[in-house]
Image (spheres, rainbow, N blue to C red):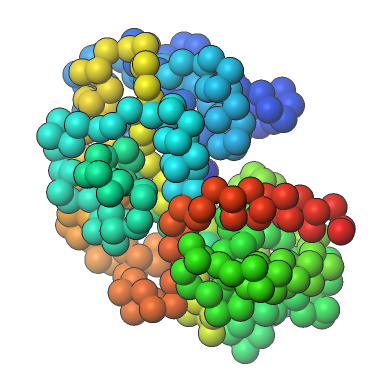
Amino acid sequence: MKSMLSRLVLAATVMLGAGTVYTLAEAGGDLVVFDWSGYEDPMLHPAYTAKYGADPSFSFFGDEDEAFEKMRAGFKADIAHPCSQSVVKWREAGLLQPLDTSRIAGWKDLNPGIMAMKDLATTADGKAWFMPFDWGNTSLLYRTDNVTRDEAQSLRVFADPKFKGRVTIGDNVDDAYALASLVIGLKDWTGMTDAQFKEASAFLRDVHKNVRFYWTDDTDLNQAVSGNEVDLVWGWNETYVTLKGQGVPIEMNRDTQEGISTWVCGYVLMKDAPGKLDQAYDFLNAVNAPGVSEYMVKTFGYGHGNAAGMAAMDHKLLVERGFDGLDKFLDKTLFQQPVPPELKRRMVTEFEKIKAGY
């Protein structure tokens, strides 16, 4: 889920071709961070840079499956930045080592709703594996000059034949099945039944008939919306913040009849990390510092994992970025907590078929 920053870096990586992992060679320091492009922004870890006089070395991945295969093939990093759906897979593959939470200042200040997600930050044996860093909503965005407010009250609008060729959703299996799960009335997808899976997949096939393209990059998505190529987007906070700031007639409806989805990404400590452990924990402390919260919200449009930092922010900014009054949406929110591995594999396989028109 991925930042609006360093798009030149991202564009260059796209030119290298799918599946390529690329390294920011000029970065200093012994610590290697495996991350999404844009998160190398020094303002996200200022305390680390101040202490060591250099940024960590960053290597980038384009998606988490690519990152997983790269690490299984022997790529070594100290820290990586997966999202909730990958944590169980990475942990079960033996790629991670537990976190020593006594070395992470502000661990107790992490968002309690995220920390309560089953098998994410911690496991039943009390071990900690994942430090939430960034989170946001996937919700309905629409051009107000082409879509009425009434039409945008239901997520079923994505399958309305009126918008054939005017819809885009992410090329992201988690967001796709989050959308479909909400439509069929499912808020906890960890227990999705076979019948519910078939119903959700059928809805995605209906949406596919309207899809102009499956977006993978915020830049392409923003250009399509601002260029009036699409009217309806299943997208993230960042897109709304960026386009609204550009004067595009767009709104985000987080209060549809069916609800919204909330995703979360964060940092993990890799097993057999080649760098110094002290530096790894200094980095984790730096990105979790409450002072990072405002920069994250203002620049990226995402929430910060440190709830204390979020609470201390100017309320006006929270309102502008859509992070006010989130409690009222809780009963209509699907949290993208990890699903059973077999269900995840089934989702991936089916989504590929749907995108191919089958």
Camera-nearest residue between 247 and 32: 32
Quarter-wise, where is residue 18 in the image?
A: top right
Asked whether, in this view, residue 61 is left or right of residue 188, the answer is right
Quarter of the picture holding the C terminus: bottom right
Camera-nearest residue between 201 and 296: 201
Camera-nearest residue between 174 and 256: 174
Residue 294 appears at what percent x and percent y? 28, 50
Quarter-wise, where is residue 201 in the image?
A: bottom right
Quarter-wise, where is residue 326 in the image?
A: bottom left
Q: What's the residue at 56%, 37% (across, down)?
A: 64
Q: What's the residue at 37%, 16% (across, down)?
A: 272
Residue 37 appears at what percent x and percent y? 52, 32
Tell me if residue 69 comes above or below residue 288 in the rendering. Answer: above
Residue 247 appears at what percent x and percent y? 57, 63
Tell me if residue 75 comes above or below residue 212 in the rendering. Answer: above
Residue 329 appears at what percent x and percent y? 39, 76
Q: Residue furthest bottom?
A: 150
Asked whether, in this view, residue 358 is left or right of residue 194, the answer is right
Q: What's the residue at 74%, 55% (across, down)?
A: 350
Tell me if residue 69 comes above or below residue 184 in the rendering. Answer: above
Tell me if residue 316 comes above or below residue 38 in the rendering. Answer: below
Can residue 282 be seen here?
yes
Q: What's the residue at 47%, 58% (across, down)?
A: 336
